[in-house]
Image: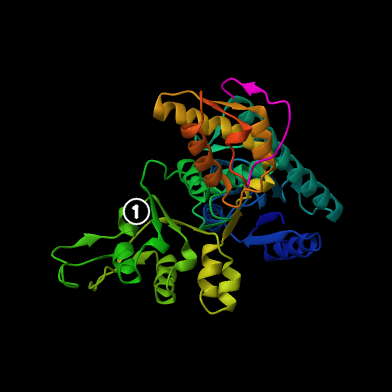
Amino acid sequence: MRKILIVDDELSIIEVLKRLLAKEGYVLVTSLDGNDARNKLKEEVFDLMITDVRLPGVDGLTLLKEARQLQSHLAVIMMTAYADVDNAVLAMKNGAFDYITKPFKFDEILLTVQRALSYEEALAENEMLRSRLTTKFHFNLIVGDSDPMVQVYRMIEKVAKTNSTVLITGESGTGKELVAKGIHNSSPRHSHPFITLNCAAMPDALLESELFGYVKGAFTGATQDRKGLFETADKGTLLLDEISTMPVNMQSKLLRVLQEKEIRRVGGTSSIPVNTRIIAATNENLEKKIRGGKFREDLYYRLSVIPLEIPPLRNRREDIPLLVSHFLDLFKKENSRSVDISSQVVESLKEYSWPGNVRELENILKRLATLCENNIIRIEDLPPAIMKKKKGVKHVKNF
């Protein structure tokens, strides 16, 4: 559902717009002044902002400029009780989609909102299309031009400039860490650390000290103070991978950090403020774990401010030729050996269900490239699970 931010210092205007737009199925967030609206733009992702020109705190025109910097695809509709042509022209020059005067007609508002949202979507699609024509990699990391991946890229662009906590979900091997890196690299935090912690690989007894650090003497072997990952990633991004495996007692401590924006080292008595963006990732159904009492519901809602689901490879089969080309290029760079692949093999790879997703495809191609004869991967080289008997094998040079 499309999300709209309404900013006006008149509560009556906000209530009217809320009732009108809620009937159309939009998700609505409201603010009574410019400073509060600016903070919301830093924390949440919106498709449209409707704002008055005259606001307490940051005025509407300044808010418009900052909104366009924070969320480049955001459509903005300006409102004013003063039919001021100069303000209207200035608003349009600064990137406003349209300008309406109070009192406004309901059908006028609805039509303008629909047009603004359509414009925002078209703008994002055109920018993404240009990107697809000029680069092999999206965000310098991710390969794939399929429609499901384009939707992922659009979401990355939207959330990158905010401080929103993101919950990335998807099957194992779909590339959740690459997406998290894409968000970080496109954000204002890109020059600061990006750190990953695999919660499943960390013993429960060490997880707290790994995240929050410890002070000298906190336990046997703690011979000096040590920073945890929250402090190490300060001003940057911390990816908590496999968040579903985090023990419940640690979940409550993580929730407190997300709420208070401060940590306390193990054995310490003082709180340390941290400015670390959290991205969480999981291949499990957290709502199911909540019902089973293994995951805190309040933490789930805190983490999933922006939910982002990565499609499995079987739902983006048109990306397989691009991925094949990419992984064989990597093999060539790593081994100084060029390997060709038959078009029949590529077709067979496209028909396989890929339960291990992109990671499985990468590992199979490495194995095939290593073991193939005469530097050509043929249909008979495929594992039995993938094997498809076809005729008319063709060899494609540097696929």
Q: Quadrant of residue 379?
A: top right
Q: Quadrant of the C terminus?
A: top right
Q: Position of residue 153 (x, y in %)?
A: 60, 42
- Is residue 67 in view? no
Tell me if 220 is positioned left or right of 351 in this view. left
Residue that protrudes farthest toward the top in the picture: 397
Q: Is residue 44 above or below residue 68?
A: below
- Is residue 167 in view? yes
Q: Is residue 46 above or below residue 222?
A: above
Label the magenta part by its dominant secondary structure: loop
Asked if residue 27 lies in the magenta stretch, the reply is: no
Binning the other alpha carbons within 10 Å of mark 1 as few (below 14), some (14 to 19) or many (20 upward) gives some
Q: Where does the magenta region start and end?
A: 385-399
Tell me if 257 is positioned left or right of 156 in this view. left
Q: Quadrant of the N terminus?
A: bottom right
Residue that protrudes farthest toward the left in the picture: 223
Instruction: Give the colouring mode of the picture.
Output: rainbow
Q: Amino acid at mark 1?
A: Asp
Q: Position of residue 27 (x, y in %)?
A: 70, 60
Q: Nearer the viewer, residue 195 or 93?
A: 195
Q: Position of residue 174 (x, y in %)?
A: 56, 49
Q: Quadrant of residue 395?
A: top right
Asked if residue 390 lies in the magenta stretch, the reply is: yes
Tell me if 173 is positioned left or right of 335 in this view. right
Residue under numbered circle 1: 234
